[in-house]
Image (cartoon, rainbow, N blue to C red):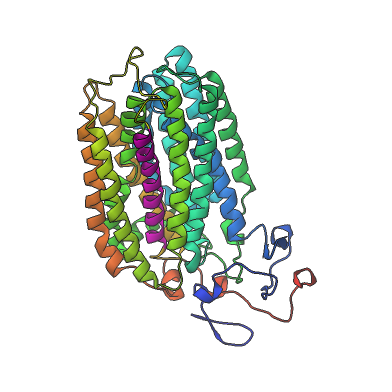
Amino acid sequence: MALNEKDGTAHDISSPAHSTELTHGDVVPPRPQGWIYKTISIGPFRTWYASPAVQLLLVAFVCFLCPGMFNALGGMGGTGLQNAQAGDDANTALYSTFAVVGFAAGTFTNRLGIKVALSFGGLGYTIYVASFLCFKHTSNFGFSIFAGALLGVCAGLLWSAQGAIMMSYPPESMKGRYISWFWMIFNLGGVVGSLIPLGQNIHTTSNSSVSDGTYIGFIILTFIGAVLAFTLVDGKKVIRHDGSRVILMKNPSWWSEISGLWEVFLTDPYIVLLFPMFFASNWFYTYQFNDVNLAYFNTRTRALNNTLYWSSQIFGAVIFGYALDVQSIRRTTRAKFAWAALFTLTFAIWGGGYAFQTRYTRSTYPEKDSVVKEDWTTSGYVGPMFLYMFYGFYDAAWQTCVYWFMGSLTNNGRKLANFAGFYKGIQSAGAAVMWRIDGLDNPPAYMSLFASCWALLGGSLILALPVILLRVRDHVPLEDDLKFTDETAADVVPKIDTEGRDEEEKV
């Protein structure tokens, strides 16, 4: 709690009373001068450039163009090539460096700032895509592995910055919606990106690599995303619609952020119980992309499946994101419902996946050009198509809930940057292991890889349950959020002035 400077009343910057977007009938707190604070009217709503919503949209479009295109390419299986070896090796390098850098990425993000972290991160995706265009013509394994390792460093910074914005900028009662808005736009990148290979390979019924134009299109789009990151404003300049500011370090130093990384384990040791959920969250991508889509379907059907997969993610994000923000239900209760929903979906969807996996093995569908694989015109395609769509829906539900669980533990931007770094680092460690296993000369059976996905998902939910039951609160007090920063309540609380509004803000 903090005192309003004008009337001395208690004022809580994270309370549900300050959780909604402003309409034309609302009081607008005074803001500093400058174009980034100039009021923008969109229908009944008002906002400004340095608002959380606008900044989230910009970050979402950066990820639409960078990780979104990466997902579209990876979702084709084999990173668009007819053989998955180069992609497996590059992704092993990617997730290995991502695991190391990502775990500590919150330290670098807090010190370097959001814009630098996001832009540098975006460039890594451009180089990564270019390496596979090069490989298609030169078989240069070295370049693709280097590009993968570089992208691991870049992606660690990008996702730490993205996670901090998505979880710390919105008020408590809107975190689910902000996560869903981001996830919708981000995965729209996967949808649009997957339409490129679908359109260019719509008549390709064999098992082949995607065209050069596909790679060139991805290179251009990812570079635009890296440049777009420079349009963001610094987190210290962001002002919410109730006038409050994001809780950050006023004077971050390399030492304060390095020590802050370890302070998190002292103040929030329970976070380790979420680590298994982090580890499992990208483990299943390798199985779904390489051992289902690439293994079972021909080129054009892989492209169609890819489009449907990322489209389903949008629906999953909308449903779970908005459900997690239902204010008529206490947040502690919503957290329990979310856990129960994930547990139910894990056994329903992956149970269907088990039935599908019994249909084929590595010996019946080897990675050879001569093998005729399933097409969308094949009888019985509809069942596997819906399974693949449900896999996408499940991924969005899982990611949305994990981010929301973390965001419900604190509103401190510095701490959430570290949480996001832990999430992406450990997530990448799991992905690195799975990509390496799938890339072995004699990889395990498809059923064994499927079983590892299902077991990890179910087991990690059980381990996370104590956090859901004991650590999620209906509201995190301001005093608790300020403990991990050098800011005071006066730095972040809104200054409400109902009499001194600018003329441009009156309606």
What kind of secondary structure does the magenta stretch mostly adopt? helix
Q: Residue at x 49, y 39 (%)?
A: 67
The x and y percentages for residue 1 are 48, 80
Q: Is residue 10 above or below residue 274?
A: below
The x and y percentages for residue 75 are 42, 33
The quadrant holding residue 379 is top left
Q: Nearer the viewer, residue 295 or 167?
A: 295
Left or right: 473 in relation to 445:
right
Q: Residue at x 34, y 22 (%)?
A: 85
Asked whether residue 304 is in view, the answer is yes
Q: Residue at x 59, y 58 (%)?
A: 53
Q: Which quadrant, please, contains the C terminus?
A: bottom right
The x and y percentages for residue 203 are 50, 19
Q: Nearer the viewer, residue 80 or 109?
A: 80
Q: Is residue 412 above or below residue 380?
A: below
The residue stretch that appears in magenta: 382-407
